[in-house]
Amino acid sequence: MSTEVRPRPVRFRGRSYLAFSLAPEPPIADWLTDLDAAISRSSGFFVGRPAVLDLAHTALSQPAIALLIQELESRDIRIMGIEGAESADLGPGLPPLLTSGRPASGGELVRSAPEVKDKPTPKAPEPPPGSLLVEAPVRSGQTIYYPNGDVVVLGSVGSGAEVVAGGSIHIYGALRGRAMAGASGNAKARIFCRKIEAELLAIGGYYRTVDDLEDDLRNRPVQAWLDGNAMLIAALE
Amino acid sequence: MAKVVVVTSGKGGVGKTTSTAGLGTALAQTGQTVVVVDFDVGLRNLDLVLGAERRVVFDFINVVQGAVKLHQALIRDKRVETLWLLPASQTRDKDALSDEGVARVIAELRTRFDWILCDSPAGIERGATLAMRHADAAVIVTNPEVSSVRDSDRIIGLLDSKTEKAERGERIDKHILITRYDAGRASRGEMLNITDVLEILSLPLLGIIPESEEVLRASNLGTPVVLNNPASPPARAYLEAARRLMGEQLDVKVPSEKRGLFTKLFGRRAA
């Protein structure tokens, strides 16, 4: 039948973003004056960069929080979430409460701020390397999880083993288990392997079991990539 | 230097106990002192295969818990005088083994024997991980079929992460022992062939034990096949595997199907 109705799948994906967190310290009026001075040195710093308001050092009432957010918006700083407050303190008109934030290296504005100036600049934590090299075969039951980039496996990936990468997956052996590339939603990620006998492939949230693989691709070197909503698999040579 | 070898597989029924007895006996026949330790607490079999079931007084659990001395539980084989057995308890379960107790017993065995062969229970739970914990080398027993090979792959992953050596960042020597190999069925594609198994597991081959009635007959008699019929193909395969375990370089011959003149001339009898 040509008029088959297919339910359209709804996709949810976890994503993390880097955001600036502003932590006002009482008295708030003085803190706003300091902030104005910092903004005047690097105007436009907050343009297009929504920020998170960290209220851990303050004890503000709900109307005071609303007023502070208004003050910040008048300086073109848009607050997309609040952390360090009780959810009971936040009314329906205020941004949502965020939890489980982790520190990242600071932005320029923070480094040029007067109170940090005379301290030595803290060394930024070393950025994670762009790829993970696995020199041994990945055995059944093992999971390699590397959300920061590509995974390169020099051996085979056994049946029942799993490789999950934020970027692409390169396997210089047979792929007999599962490979999930672009695990955090990167649709440009690809999967490469020397020999495909895989159980399951996934790219950017789209899954495909390899049960229905064309016979002429079986046991050959292939790559898999996403073309819109479809996962394509083609021989490499 | 004593060497602790775990005989393991993940899957049950592939021939761990038979292989422990076969390799242990073959090693002992060279004059080295060997103890085979049954880690399959609650389902002990090694005593039966070695024909020592009516000589068990104390067992591994008694020693681990400090109730008796090690020499009270060790049973000396009547045929090969350098072969000893440390039997498991049949009435207890794996929870009766404590980490410290096992470590202490293995350390004491190291001072008395050249080879300590640990017969692992099936599975990947406590019993199996305790059996591999102190190993210097592992013999992974695999049948040429997909489920056994995948379970072996799983066990190899554990050997690389849960053993003391692995935790110190060292690697333990791992060998594949293929058992129950039927040349006829492999040639007809009813079994994985040796190349497939080794490609999937990517480890060196210790030996290929052919499927044989001799093995079952010997087990039922309580005599390892190496002693019961030393000239039989499985006995010869265990003897050669033991020599490879001792470091000798020997080529592994893939058993081929033996066909008599009759079948050669007239083909297989119609079923």
Image (cartoon, grey):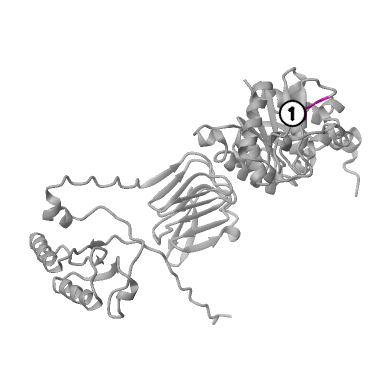
- Packing grade of label 1 (10 A; few <14, some 14-19, many >=20) is many
The correct choice, above or below, for A41 with respect to B135 in the image is: below
Chain identity of mark 1: B
Residue name at image x 58 percent, y 47 percent: A158
The region drawn magenta spans B71-77
Query: Label 1 amino acid?
Result: Leu
The reply to whether the magenta stretch includes residue B74 is yes
Residue furthest top in the image: B31
- The quarter of the displayed image where residue B3 is located: top right
Q: Residue at x 34, y 73 (%)?
A: A87
Q: Is residue A207 left or right of residue B186?
A: left
Q: Magenta stretch containing residue A60, yes or no?
A: no
Place of residue B135 in the rendered image (x, y in percent of width and height, measured from the top left): 62, 32
Residue extending farthest front: B67
| Res. A101 in view | yes
Residue A153 picture location, percent across and down:
48, 44
Mark 1 secondary-structure assignment: helix
Q: What residue is disc 1 on? A: B23
Which quadrant of the view contains residue B35? top right
User: Residue A156: x and y, percent?
Assistant: 54, 44
In-image side of A126 versus B207 (left or right): left
Task: Work out whether A168 lies above or below B70.
Answer: below
The image shows residue A120 at horizontal and vertical percentages of: 16, 45
Closer to us: A161 or A201? A161
The N terminus of chain A sits in image quarter: bottom right
